[in-house]
Image (spheres, helix red, strand yellow):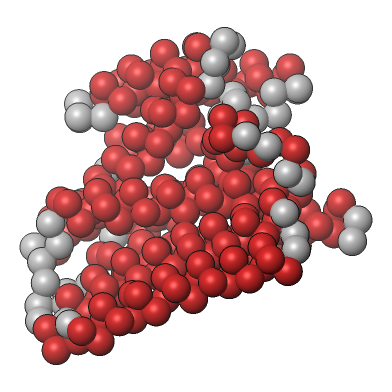
């Protein structure tokens, strides 16, 4: 398989995962029972373990690593299903989502997005860019396999809310920031300048809204500027921003329905 075919295959898999995550995010709006909540956690946790297992195999392809990958997925599924059958009788009860659930689900979504950056990066570039923990973290987060699936999910969620006239306008700049991250394509000077301008512009736009996200946009501005020296402040602001993006989106729909 040549590089173009590999890239197309990975794009297909990532698009499928994005579609699944968008469906699950939409389901957060509609869940009313403990069974529905369990299904959400089960889906996101299993997706994370699937990506971890795939990363283990891709890092060192062998029969042993394949066995470990399968074992990780099987063990996690057995444990979750064991819990399900242990509490199955109570899962039909009605359930009201609280803030802790919004944050935990949002955290799982972002975790899966980060693992997508790791897994698809390993598949495309091999193990060298992920040879130690710092490199693995850097190349997982500062990857188009992390940013663009995430942007697609955010945009899809925003359109869903927009179609219901419930889209918080203060969230939109975050989509623009993730569309032009200055930490990818760093070898392209025109991209770097464009990303810096877009990142600063979108963050400044975010400051015009009176919301609790203003502090986040201030940190993001600092993060964009400091990408000249280090990506970590920008990466941290993006992770925090994504969690808040999903939490605010969940709340906007829930409040409108209550």
Please state, as top left, top right, bottom left or bottom right, where the N terminus lies in the image: bottom right
Instruction: Give the position of the C terminus as an image quadrant.
Output: bottom left
Q: Which residue is at a point 62% across and 61% down the rendered structure image?
A: 54
Task: Tell me residue 141's x, y (percent).
Answer: 54, 37
Q: Tell me which corner region of the image, top left, top right, bottom left or bottom right, holds residue 256.
A: bottom left
Residue at figure coordinates x 43%, y 49% from the top left: 111
Coordinates of residue 17 in the picture (x, y in percent): 55, 63
Q: Foreground residue, 101 or 49?
A: 49
Q: Residue at x 73, y 69 (%)?
A: 63
90 above or below 175? below
Relative to 226, residue 8 above or below = below
**Residue 181 found in image quarter:** top right
Residue sitting nearer the eye, 249 or 45: 45
For the question of whether residue 167 can be seen, the reply is no
Instruction: Name the residue nearer the viewer: 144 or 153.
Output: 144
- Asked if 50 appears above or below 239 in the picture, the reply is below
Question: Which quadrant of the view contains residue 68?
Answer: bottom right
Can residue 161 be seen at all in this image of the molecule? yes
């Amino acid at each position: 398989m040549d590089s173009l075919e590999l890239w197309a295959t990975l794009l297909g898999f990532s698009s499928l995962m994005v579609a699944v995550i968008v469906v699950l995010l939409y389901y957060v709006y509609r869940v009313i029972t403990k069974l529905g909540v369990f299904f959400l956690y089960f889906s996101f946790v299993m997706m994370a373990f699937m990506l971890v297992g795939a990363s283990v195999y891709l890092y060192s392809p062998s029969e042993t690593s394949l066995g470990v990958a399968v074992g990780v997925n099987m063990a996690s599924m057995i444990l979750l299903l064991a819990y399900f059958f242990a509490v199955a009788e109570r899962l039909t009860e009605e359930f009201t989502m609280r803030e802790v659930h919004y944050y935990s689900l949002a955290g799982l979504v972002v975790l899966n997005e980060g693992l997508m950056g790791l897994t698809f990066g390993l598949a495309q570039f091999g193990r060298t860019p992920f040879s130690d923990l710092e490199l693995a973290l850097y190349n997982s987060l500062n990857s188009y396999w992390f940013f663009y699936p995430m942007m697609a999910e955010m945009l899809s969620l925003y359109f869903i809310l927009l179609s219901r006239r419930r889209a918080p306008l203060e969230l939109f700049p975050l989509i623009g920031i993730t569309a032009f991250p200055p930490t990818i394509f760093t070898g392209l000077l025109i991209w770097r300048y464009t990303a810096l301008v877009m990142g600063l512009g979108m963050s400044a736009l975010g400051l015009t809204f009176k919301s609790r996200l203003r502090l986040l946009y201030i940190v993001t501005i600092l993060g964009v500027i400091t990408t000249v020296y280090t990506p970590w402040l920008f990466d941290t602001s993006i992770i925090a921003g994504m969690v808040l993006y999903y939490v605010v989106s969940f709340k906007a729909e829930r409040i409108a329905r209550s």
